Amino acid sequence: MKSILRKEKDFSVSNWSGGKTKELAIFPADSKYADREFIYRLSSATVDLEESDFTMLPDYDRVLMVLQGSTVLTYNGKKSVHLNELEQDSFDGAWATKSYGKITDYNLMTRKGTAGKVDVIRPEAEAVEMGDTLESDLRRRTHALYCKEGYLIVNAKDGQKMVSPGQLLVMEFGEEEPAYTVMGDGVAIRAQIAFDEGAPGYAEYEEMKPEPEPEPEPEDEPEPVRREEIRKENAETPGSYVANILGTARRRVSDEGLSEASTLDYKGGFAEDYKWSFILSNTQFHGAKALFPKLKSLVFDDELHGKVRRLEKMLITFFVFILGLLALLTFSMKDGEMKDTEILIMIAVWLVIDILIVSPAIYYFTLPKPIKSHIHDLTKVSEEEADALLKDRNKNERLERILKKYSNSGRNVGTVIADKARREKELDE
């Protein structure tokens, strides 16, 4: 098994009758689209005309998924289909295909006699095991993950890779059973391809040999030594051991630091800090990243992450809003009763004041400054830095859940976590 992460610089762009096509991957790698001798091709094209004719490809089957916009496809003038964003359709490349509507699409072309499939993946913070869902007896398998928005962290046999928006991770499994895990946030499109002996480029798979796994780097001694000391110090206090491990994990990323390029440009001053206080105070709700996609590429360092979570868990802004509203209504009604419309207007006015001033002010006086220097852009950090940050963040949150679960159970949480860490280390070795 081997994988290749393809980025913008690796893609070629060409013109077609209806717009432009960006070739994301083609196999064999040295084949040319114009020669029509490839096994599969992945591409993203723009359709810039309201009405356009697709190129005839009689030797290929096709899958088209809409990335942006909406379109109507017709085949041979006898069948039509309406596709919205992230909807797809499969069709024969020999059909006379017309499109109506301007879109950006994602295309999979597979030579007849091979098999291909496209589906949508929505990764979560916890890693999910992925396998092959393509129903085919063909033995050679390839999976390709295209990141539409957000980010992906993919763990496979040859290591861990981060996929940013617009990048494509191609995993060639040969005759191995496809197996890997995916975590992250956003939307990804997966293409599954299968072929067998006799297909063009088959010799490339015959020559494919697994790359030797890198030898694990020796762990620093202070970490396990310190863990043992903490266990002894907190043997009689369930939960303290976990708290210390959490602190150790968070300090690791903070001490190593992230590249300066990943930190958002900071212009300085009250206005800049207050702007970010306003953004953070009004985006701590479920679904915020769906409404504001740019948030998906931003990651807080541990100091900022911890203080934002503490504010939300303590419901400080909520209680301040309720107390302020009650005080305002009490003061307004001291001279007599108010009409229902006046009360509604008062509530609306206080809500606006809370959104624009009160909640941002609470965040401003609580969060570390400069706030922007604690926020990093995932699209600018190196893969190693992103991996370290996300790994520790997921580890911290899992430990916190364990701490919450066992804090009132009477069990020695230090022993539970120490045993778990020891088992994980034995598996790694």
Image: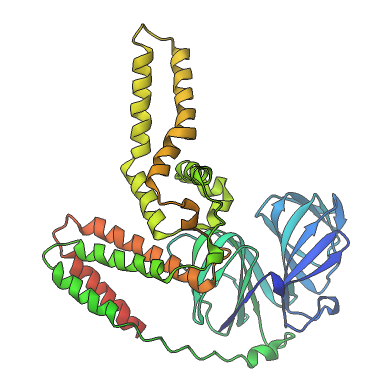
Badge count: 0
* Viewer-side residue, 15 vs 204: 15
The answer to whether residue 131 is visible is no
* Residue appearing at x 37%, y 35% in the figure: 318
The image quarter in which residue 306 lies:
bottom left
* Residue appearing at x 19%, y 57% in the figure: 407
Residue 385 placement (x, y as % from top left): 49, 70
Name of the residue lying farthest toward the front: 269
* Viewer-side residue, 288 vs 16: 288
Q: In this view, does 406 lie above or below 58?
A: above
Which colour scheme appears in the figure? rainbow
Q: Is residue 308 above or below residue 3?
A: above
Name of the residue lying farthest toward the top: 336
The answer to whether residue 101 is visible is yes
Name of the residue lying farthest toward the left: 236
Residue 213 placement (x, y as % from top left): 48, 88
Q: In the displayed structure, does residue 409 sit left or right of residue 43?
A: left
* Viewer-side residue, 229 vs 21: 229
* Viewer-side residue, 139 vs 233: 233
The image quarter in which residue 75 lies:
bottom right
Which image quarter is the C terminus in? bottom left
Residue 256 placement (x, y as % from top left): 42, 71
Q: In this view, does 281 lie above or below 206?
A: above
Which image quarter is the N terminus in? bottom right
Residue 265 placement (x, y as % from top left): 57, 56
Q: In the displayed structure, does residue 293 sit left or right of residue 227?
A: right
